[in-house]
């Protein structure tokens, strides 16, 4: 296996991240599409869309209006290229181009772990709350906070569990597929911190889903999904 240990946001980091097809893609993305379809959402925003894989290869099958938002210029450029042929998709770095209370489904995939402070988390959640329609749903996919001290098939996480209850403590995350590995610095928030942040920004949790790994012998759960709605 070729190992290119590149830190997130270092030169070329976004490109490498975009190439790694970790099991998150097969575990979480199709399930999200099913949930959004069942919800009968008419519009979707992928908040922190990265290189646009979810929008271009998965949610585009829904045939609804969709937006991708990111703050990283390299990610925006990769997502725009991937979504060129999808006329129903707008990629933007400006949330003001999206109307308040208009989005039925907001996805928030692998974003919580890159936000450096509780303040950053709250700001993102407030923005999502302002854009979500009254009957809309927000779907937050995160590596399971209780299992950030172990190896799974697609990520090896190195949180010192003595720090479990400390907000925004950093830990090393290696994400990988069969060909490449990448190292990132991630930021930890405990389950209680996450639920307090959601309540403080006007969300109520509707469901928590814990995914098993794609390979059954791993213990615990690599990814969890929180479905939330407006209070
Ligand atoms: C780990 S990547 C996840 C990308 C993608 N959602 C996925 O499923 O792979 C995190 C993304 O969040 C973006 N990001 C970081 N801070 C952000 C913020 N405050 N608002 C929106 N996006 C942000 C990063 O630029 C990056 O593209």
Image (cartoon, grey):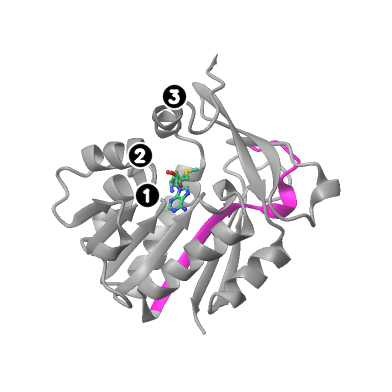
Q: Residues within 10 Å of mark 3 (few under 14, many from 20)?
A: few
The image position of residue 69, as x and y in percent, is 34, 53
Q: Does residue 48 lie above or below 41 as drawn? A: above
Say whether residue 153 is visible.
no
The answer to which of marks 1 and 3 sits earlier in the sequence is 3
The image position of residue 175, as x and y in percent, is 57, 33
**Res. 11 mark:** 3
Residue stretch rendered in magenta on the structure: 136-152
**Res. 153 mark:** none
Label 3 residue SS: loop
Q: Is residue 213 left or right of residue 111?
A: right
The image position of residue 142, as x and y in percent, is 57, 53
**Res. 75 mark:** 2
Q: Residues within 10 Å of mark 2 (few under 14, many from 20)?
A: many
Instruction: Determine the CA span between mark 2 and mark 1.
Output: 7 Å
The answer to which of marks 2 and 1 sits earlier in the sequence is 1
The answer to which of marks 3 and 2 sits earlier in the sequence is 3
**Res. 70 mark:** 1
The image position of residue 52, as x and y in percent, is 33, 44
Q: Is residue 77 magenta?
A: no
Q: Residue at x 73, y 48 (%)?
A: 147
Q: Does residue 72 lie above or below 6 as drawn? A: below
Q: Residue at x 72, y 56 (%)?
A: 167
Q: Are marks 2 and 1 in contact (CB under 8 Å)?
A: yes
Is the C-beta of the residue carrying label 1 under 8 Å from the nearest atom of ligand 1? yes
Label 2 residue SS: helix
Q: Where the N terminus falls, by quadrant? A: top right
Q: Is residue 131 left or right of residue 98?
A: right
Q: Is residue 222 left or right of residue 147?
A: left
Is the C-beta of the residue carrying label 2 under 8 Å from the nearest atom of ligand 1? yes
Q: Does residue 159 lie above or below 44 as drawn? A: above
Instruction: Determine the CA span between mark 1 and mark 3.
Output: 17 Å
């Amino acid at each position: 296996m070729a190992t290119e240990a590149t830190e997130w946001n270092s030169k070329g980091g976004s490109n490498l991240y975009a190439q790694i097809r970790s099991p998150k893609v097969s575990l979480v993305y199709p399930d999200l599409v099913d949930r959004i379809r069942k919800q009968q959402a008419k519009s979707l925003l992928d908040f922190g869309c990265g290189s646009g894989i979810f929008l271009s290869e998965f949610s585009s099958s829904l045939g609804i209006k969709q937006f991708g938002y990111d703050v990283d210029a390299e990610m925006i450029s990769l997502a725009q290229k991937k979504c060129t042929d999808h006329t129903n998709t707008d990629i933007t770095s400006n949330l003001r181009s999206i109307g308040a209370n208009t989005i039925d489904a907001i996805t928030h995939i692998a974003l919580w772990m890159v936000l450096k402070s509780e303040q950053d988390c709250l700001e993102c959640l407030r923005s999502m709350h302002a854009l979500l329609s009254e009957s809309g749903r927000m779907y937050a996919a995160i590596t399971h906070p209780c299992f950030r001290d172990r190896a799974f098939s697609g990520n090896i996480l190195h949180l010192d569990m003595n720090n479990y209850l400390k907000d925004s403590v950093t830990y090393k995350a290696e994400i990988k597929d069969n060909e490449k590995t990448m190292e990132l610095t991630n930021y930890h928030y405990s389950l209680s911190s996450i639920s307090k942040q959601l309540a403080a920004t006007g969300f109520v949790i509707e469901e928590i889903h814990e995914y098993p790994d794609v390979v059954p012998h791993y213990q615990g759960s690599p990814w969890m999904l929180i479905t939330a709605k407006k209070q």
